[in-house]
Structures are given as structure tokens and as C-alpha cells.
Image: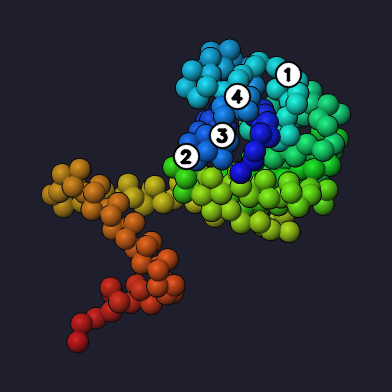
């Protein structure tokens, strides 16, 4: 648990909202007022307040006041201006967690002039608590801060720590972008079922349960996918 630590979200968009929702629904954060989110759109702030009971502001500077953890959840194209605004204004003992894709720890530390930074790469399945997040930390991140990072990311699904930041770029292609390929495959299977004469509802149910069952079989048996595939496709005797 994170106790009474205050968490500031810089950016109240889709991914930020997913994380807020998971932290509150899993009780990792016990009280909504321990969370504050900043967003330049006042209507978005109002929505987050009404939906989750958290505090909001249109000021990034206001958001980080008193926070123990700052989560950067902005789009890459606005990150430079956000970091310029926050530079030298985050207390050295605060943990900064970035979910901004493609931005290195060195760039984050330099842009914020802040030593304790964790870079993460979550995927969209965090919305339902089955996300996959690979993360890496700067050398200034303490063991307690690493523990806090794990607690937050475990609320989103599976987390994998790596000392080699280079693996995050690989994870972006495999795990984050990979969800798009999975959905494309699911769509193709459903369409094939419809073409064979099933209703779209029937085809979707069969497809989703087939894929979910196949994944669970691999998780439980730990068998190589080729071995399992051969059990299905090998010729009859």
C-alpha cells in the first residue's frame, strides 16, 4: 500500500484516467483526495472530479505541491514544454514516474533537472487490470521508491523491471503495439466466423473464448506454443 502518499498526475487523458481508476478500485490509494490530476481542459478536470472524487487543477505547478509521487501522463509532443515548466520545481525526494513513450530516463532527468525517475511502458490492457508494464529506474531511485513503483504497476497487471533501459523500446513494439495486432487477429477470426454463417455475436463469443482458453492453457502447462500447436494440427493416425 502507499499509505497517505499524495500522487500527482500531470495529464488527465485516457491513460492517466485508467491508472487513476485502477489505483482507486484496487484500494492501493485509500482516499480519492490523495490524488490530484492536472489538465489544461477545465471540462476534463470537472469530469475526473465527478467520476472519481479526486482533486484537479489546470496548473501543473499546483498539482505537484506536496506530492510524493508525480506521474507524467502527457502526450510526447507536449512533454518538452511540460518539463520546461516543471524544471527545478519538483522536490529531490519525490519519485517521478513517466508513461510517455519513447522518452529516455536521461532525457527526463535532464528536462526536469530531477534525479529520481522511473520510465515505464504500459499497454492498453491496464484498463481492466491485465496490463503489461516494463519499467526501468534511474540510479537515484531508492528501494522504497522502487517498491512504490511496483505497487502502482501491479494494480495495472503484470510488471517487469529491467536494469537495461533498452528493453523498454523492445517492449513498446512487442507488448504495447502488440495489442493492436492481437485485436486485428481477433477481428479477422470474427469476420471469418460470420462468413462461415455464424452470427457476429456467436463468432465473437467463440473467438474470445478460444483465444482466452489458449492463453490459459499455455500459462498453466508452460509448454512451447509449437508443442501445443502440433497437438491441434498434427495429422491423424
Instruction: Please name the residue that numbered disc 1 is placed on.
Output: 62
Residue 43 left/right relative to 148 = left
Dot label at residue 30: 3
- Nearest to the observer: residue 5 or residue 93: 5
Outermost residue on the left side: it is 197
Q: Earlier in the sequence, mark 2 or mark 4?
A: 4
Asked if labels 3 and 4 touch by Cβ distance under 8 angstroms, the answer is no
Q: CA distance from mark 1 to mark 2?
A: 27 Å
Element carrying mark 4: helix
Q: At x 68% / y 31%, what residue is drawn?
A: 6
Which residue bears the numbered disc 4?
33
Instruction: Judge the density around disc 1: few (<14), some (14-19), many (≥20) Cα neighbours within 10 Å.
Output: some
Q: Please give the residue where the numbered disc 2 appears in the rendered image.
A: 127
The colour scheme used to paint the residues is rainbow
Which of the two marks, 2 or 4, is nearer to us in this view? 4
Q: Which residue is most to the bottom?
A: 237
Callout 1: helix, strand or loop? helix
Q: Is residue 183 left or right of residue 237?
A: right
CA separation in Å, label 2 and label 4: 21 Å
Q: Are marks 2 and 3 in contact (CB under 8 Å)?
A: no
Amino acid at each position: 500500500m502507499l499509505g497517505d502518499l499524495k500522487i500527482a498526475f500531470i495529464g488527465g487523458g485516457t491513460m492517466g484516467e485508467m491508472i487513476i481508476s485502477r489505483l482507486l478500485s484496487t484500494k492501493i490509494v485509500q482516499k480519492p483526495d490523495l490524488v490530484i490530476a492536472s489538465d489544461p481542459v477545465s471540462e476534463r478536470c470537472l469530469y475526473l472530479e465527478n467520476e472519481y472524487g479526486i482533486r484537479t487543477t489546470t496548473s501543473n505547478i499546483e498539482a505537484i505541491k506536496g506530492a510524493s509521487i508525480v506521474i507524467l501522463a502527457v502526450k510526447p509532443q507536449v512533454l518538452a514544454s511540460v518539463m520546461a515548466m516543471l524544471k527545478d520545481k519538483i522536490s529531490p525526494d519525490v519519485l517521478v514516474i513517466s508513461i510517455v513513450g519513447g522518452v529516455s530516463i536521461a532525457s527526463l532527468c535532464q528536462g526536469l533537472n530531477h534525479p529520481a525517475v522511473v520510465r515505464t511502458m504500459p499497454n492498453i490492457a491496464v484498463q481492466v487490470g491485465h496490463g503489461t508494464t516494463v519499467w526501468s529506474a534511474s540510479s537515484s531511485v531508492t528501494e522504497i521508491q522502487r517498491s512504490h513503483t511496483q505497487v502502482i504497476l501491479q494494480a495495472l497487471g503484470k510488471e517487469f523491471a529491467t536494469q537495461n533501459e533498452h528493453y523498454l523500446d523492445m517492449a513498446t513494439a512487442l507488448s504495447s503495439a502488440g495489442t493492436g495486432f492481437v485485436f486485428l487477429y481477433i477481428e479477422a477470426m470474427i469476420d471469418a466466423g460470420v462468413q462461415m454463417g455464424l452470427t457476429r455475436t456467436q463468432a465473437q463469443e467463440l473467438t474470445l473464448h478460444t483465444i482466452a482458453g489458449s492463453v490459459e492453457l499455455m500459462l498453466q502447462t508452460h509448454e512451447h506454443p509449437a508443442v501445443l500447436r502440433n497437438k491441434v494440427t498434427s495429422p491423424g493416425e
